[in-house]
Image (tube, rainbow, N blue to C red):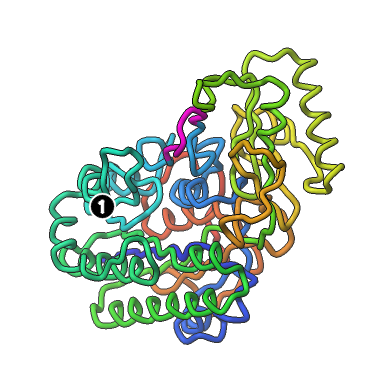
């Protein structure tokens, strides 16, 4: 192996967390000895799965087809996620590496299940009564590596609790690097996202999780130093989060106005118009409506936004296209800070006691709602600093560094940080 590339995705680290991470030794080393992009604009909706599909492809959700975390399945109580790598339309770094006969690995990388990845521990969970975690992991990951890793490191796990899950992820990635020596590896850590959801963006729990991220960076830097292999180390995040205090049951409007047909148990059988939540944003989908009916929905939604002061604008198809969001949607809405969209239908329009204290999905153009990016090692300028870039610039940059020949990217490499 002449040159390898290692990617850490630190879910939900934001530019606004810089007062913490810029003073930690691992992050500090990357900033001083590598390249640091302070604000990275995400995709819309700013969710984990659309973001990671864009990170791996250099294209917007409208092009990748990964337009949400969840499929729209109105009749299901628990909708399926976009777990499968085959769902990504067009080229990806995994596919480009395969054409170059390079070995790849992924550990809990979103939208990677059953992918053509040499050593893959898929991010997927059971979503049917007859499934369990062991079953779905074995069916969607690289069997032999997973069996070996589970035998050695399953004791680190405590369900999905953190930091135990990330401890397992780190151990699995280290095992794969040492035993299989992939040319490109992609690893997804989730603790900060988890703690922001449960405790809020500025909580002590989040600060501690960021410090744990830093320790994982230090551990990888030590491995790189000991191995002596030419390495490019990429540390990135996918989105920020904002604190929330109320949920919006916008499907109450569609239910009361007769846009749903339902089963006897209350589940939605079919719809003429429906809201599909995306955290701090939502899509509105319509089926078979006339233009005057669509116009009425838009006016009604705008009136709701003004009445409760919960969102400013209902974006139409042209604006959705400009955002690079789902072209199949009729409308797209982003809430004001403090609110999120709730898929459920209930007696009250607002969810007064949300499950979470923070979320994402919001318009990435919101001030200071930015991800971050660090690159260190082979091909990277030492001490380079850049104020702004975009999530879709990352894949073309990696492709340039590794000479992968990624096809169809909608952005260019970040040349300012490359040697």
* Residue 419 seen from this side: no
* Residue 2 seen from this side: yes
Which residue does the image show at 37% across and 54% down from the upper left?
A: 109
Residue 77 falls within the magenta-colored stretch = yes
Residue 340 drawn above or below residue 36: above
Residue 44 drawn above or below residue 419: above
Residue 400 falls within the magenta-colored stretch = no
Q: Is residue 207 left or right of residue 303?
A: left
Which residue does the image show at 43% across and 63% down from the upper left?
A: 190
Image quadrant assignment for residue 320: top right
Span shown in magenta: 73-80
- Mark 1 highlights which residue? 120
From the image, give the main secondary structure of the stretch colored magenta. loop
Return the x and y of residue 159 as percentages of the image width and height: 32, 61
Image quadrant assignment for residue 86: top left
Return the x and y of residue 197 as percentages of the image width and height: 55, 62
Label 1 SS: strand
Quarter placement of the N terminus: bottom left
Return the x and y of residue 256 as percentages of the image width and height: 71, 26
Return the x and y of residue 304 as percentages of the image width and height: 81, 38
Which residue does the image show at 61% across and 69% down from the upper left?
A: 201
Query: 328 or 129: nearer the eye?
Result: 129
């Amino acid at each position: 192996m002449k040159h390898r590339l290692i990617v850490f995705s630190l879910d939900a680290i934001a530019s606004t967390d810089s007062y913490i991470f810029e003073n930690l030794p691992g992050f500090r080393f990357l900033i001083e000895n590598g390249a640091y992009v302070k604000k990275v604009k995400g995709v819309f909706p700013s969710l984990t799965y659309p973001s990671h599909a864009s990170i791996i492809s250099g294209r917007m959700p409208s092009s990748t087809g990964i337009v949400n975390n969840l499929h729209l399945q109105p009749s299901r109580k628990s909708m399926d996620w976009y777990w499968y790598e085959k769902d990504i339309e067009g080229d990806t770094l995994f596919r480009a590496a395969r054409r170059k006969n390079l070995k790849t690995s992924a550990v809990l990388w979103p939208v990677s299940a059953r992918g053509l990845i040499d050593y893959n521990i898929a991010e997927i969970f059971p979503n049917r009564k007859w499934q369990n975690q062991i079953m779905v992991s074995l069916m969607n990951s690289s069997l032999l590596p997973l069996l070996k890793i589970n035998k050695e490191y399953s004791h680190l796990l405590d369900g999905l609790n953190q930091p135990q899950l990330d401890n397992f992820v780190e151990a699995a990635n280290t095992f794969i690097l040492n035993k299989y020596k992939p040319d490109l590896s992609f690893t997804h850590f989730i603790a900060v996202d988890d703690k922001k959801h449960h405790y809020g963006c500025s909580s002590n729990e989040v600060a501690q999780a960021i410090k744990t991220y830093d320790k994982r960076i230090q551990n990888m830097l030590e491995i790189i130093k000991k191995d002596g292999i030419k390495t490019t180390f990429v540390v990135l995040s996918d989105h920020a989060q904002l604190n929330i205090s109320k949920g919006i049951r916008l499907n109450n409007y569609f239910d009361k106005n007769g846009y749903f047909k339902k089963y006897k148990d209350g589940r939605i059988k079919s719809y003429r118009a429906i809201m599909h939540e995306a955290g701090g944003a939502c899509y509105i989908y319509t089926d078979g409506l006339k233009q005057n009916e669509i116009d009425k929905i838009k006016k009604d939604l705008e009136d709701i936004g003004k009445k409760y002061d919960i969102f400013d604008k209902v974006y139409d198809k042209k604006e959705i296209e400009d955002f690079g969001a789902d072209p199949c949607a009729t409308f797209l809405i982003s809430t004001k800070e403090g609110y999120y969209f709730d898929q459920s239908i209930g007696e009250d329009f607002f969810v007064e006691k949300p499950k979470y204290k923070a979320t994402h999905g919001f318009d990435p153009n919101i001030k200071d709602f930015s991800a971050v990016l660090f690159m260190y090692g082979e091909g990277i300028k030492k001490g380079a600093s850049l104020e702004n870039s975009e999530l879709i610039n990352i894949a073309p940059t990696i492709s340039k560094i590794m000479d992968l020949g990624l096809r169809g990217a909608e952005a260019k490499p970040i040349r300012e940080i490359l040697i």
